[in-house]
Image (cartoon, helix red, strand yellow):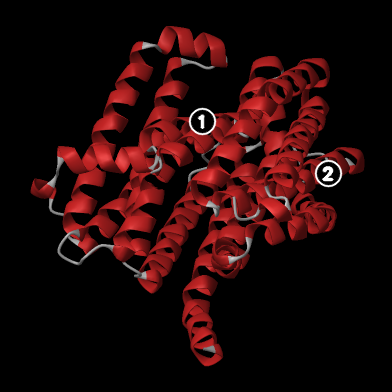
Amino acid sequence: MLKARAARLRWAAGPTLVSALASGTAAATTLVIARGAGASAFGQFTVVLSIALIVTVGMLTSLHYVMLQELPRADPGRRPELMATALLATLAVSAGLAALGVLAAPLLTAALNVDTRTLVLGLALAASMTVNQLAESFLRGLRRFAFVAWLKLAVAIVYLAGASWCLLALGVREAEPYVMALIATNVGFALTAVGAVRVRPHLWSARLARSLYRHGMYVTAIAALTGVLFGIDVIFLNHWAGPADVGVYSVYNGFPKRLLGVLFTDGVGLVLLPVMATADKPLLMRRIARLAPAVAGATAVVSFAASTVFFLLMRGAYPYSTGLMALSALGIGVHTAFNLYSVALSMDGVRGARVLIRCLLAGTPLALAALAACVRWQGLAGGLVGFALANLVLLAAVAVAAARVYRPEEGAA
């Protein structure tokens, strides 16, 4: 058994390293755009990305998560029907939500403090990210890990090369071309992946579509709540401060947060998630409770150190402040501890999902109120304080709930 486990880890190591390299290349592209385009343009880029991340939750409705569960255990003859149904249903939902967004543009642009073109770009980016994530789930569900890793790396290199050419050769300093390039690379990835798995649209099934959406209901609810919670800080800042502050905030907070999240998903998560899925849940929650302070502290230190390097590279429009970076590191540390609880609860199926949803519903009003008040009060610095406070509220909620629900004597309940 030990030999088999070691063989699986060695088999996963190659794709994991390639995927991590792809993530690093994508991160480098973000830094290139941030430094070359300037804080204001990068702030606009970040606003479009934040709108897209929130809208993607509704367009995708967690079907990528369902595919990761269903494809590996489905009979080979049933897999084409699963993929065709998921793809066509997702395209239909995405088109419908995009159309509603355009129709509601007068209301949305006023609420978000953006123009119609920015909103449309956010909707288009959301649609491209949706098909990208769904197509990737097809490849991962069929265990084509090496293919998806190399494809991600190729797309990341193309995007880095395109962004560098726009900056160095053309001198582009506006956000829109980089958003359009990101949309194009997402669509290119999706088309290549769908072609590789040979999706056959005529196998679409309305009955199966209803079943898939019911399956992803709990995960969609969690994704919607967290998508709003961890995406609206940029919207608040854009509303009460401006694009330049959004750009600086993204370098202080958004970029390190996303980078650490990707490293967890493509690195530690590869081994940790299967362990969480099979572990005794009361014991797991007690261990997480003991580890959470250390995880938050270690993440904060790593974030602070990494961001110092980022700012040395950026300079110019991104002034470095030790105090602001300490606030950012604190928030990211607490955010990581919350995510650790969140992932552990998600690995407990319906029971864990219900606990997490109740915690999010209870904590979200207070977290959003604190975030909004801090941003309106102190702008950039307030955003960093508000992000830390919001995550602290959520961390306290899940820690208390997990301690009560997963008491040892109730572990079998």
The structure residue drawn at horizontal position 71% and vertical position 39%, both measured from the top left corner, is: 401
- Nearer-N-terminus badge (2/1): 1
The structure residue drawn at horizontal position 22% and vertical position 52%, both measured from the top left corner, is: 82
When asked about the image quadrant of residue 347, the answer is: bottom right
In the rendering, at what x and y percent does residue 106 appear?
43, 7
Query: Could you say which is closer to the camera, residue 4 or residue 112?
Result: 4
Instruction: Read off the residue under disc 1.
Output: 48
The structure residue drawn at horizontal position 42% and vertical position 61%, both measured from the top left corner, is: 152
Whether residue 185 appears in this view of the structure is: no
Is 120 located above or below residue 350 in the figure?
A: above
- Give the structural element (helix, strand or loop) at label 2: helix
In the rendering, at what x and y percent does residue 225 appear?
56, 31
Query: Could you say which is closer to the camera, residue 378 or residue 42?
Result: 378
Instruction: Read off the residue under disc 2.
Output: 330
In the rendering, at what x and y percent does residue 377 appear?
82, 16
> Please, which residue is most extreme toward the right here?
323
Residue type at numbered disc 2? Leu
When asked about the image quadrant of residue 120, the answer is: top left
Disc 2 versus disc 1: nearer the observer: 2
In the rendering, at what x and y percent does residue 388 appear?
79, 36
Residue type at numbered disc 1? Val
> Please, which residue is most extreme toward the left here?
202
Is 355 located above or below residue 21 in the figure?
A: above
Q: Is residue 140 left or right of residue 260?
A: left
Q: Residues within 10 Å of mark 2 (few under 14, many from 20)?
A: many
Is 330 located above or below residue 121 in the figure?
A: below
Q: Residues within 10 Å of mark 1 (few under 14, many from 20)?
A: many
Q: Is residue 202 left or right of residue 118?
A: left
Query: Could you say which is closer to the camera, residue 4 or residue 139?
Result: 4
Give the alpha-carbon distance from disc 2 to disc 1, as whole Å. Answer: 26 Å
Q: Is residue 2 left or right of residue 339?
A: left
Whether residue 230 appears in this view of the structure is: yes
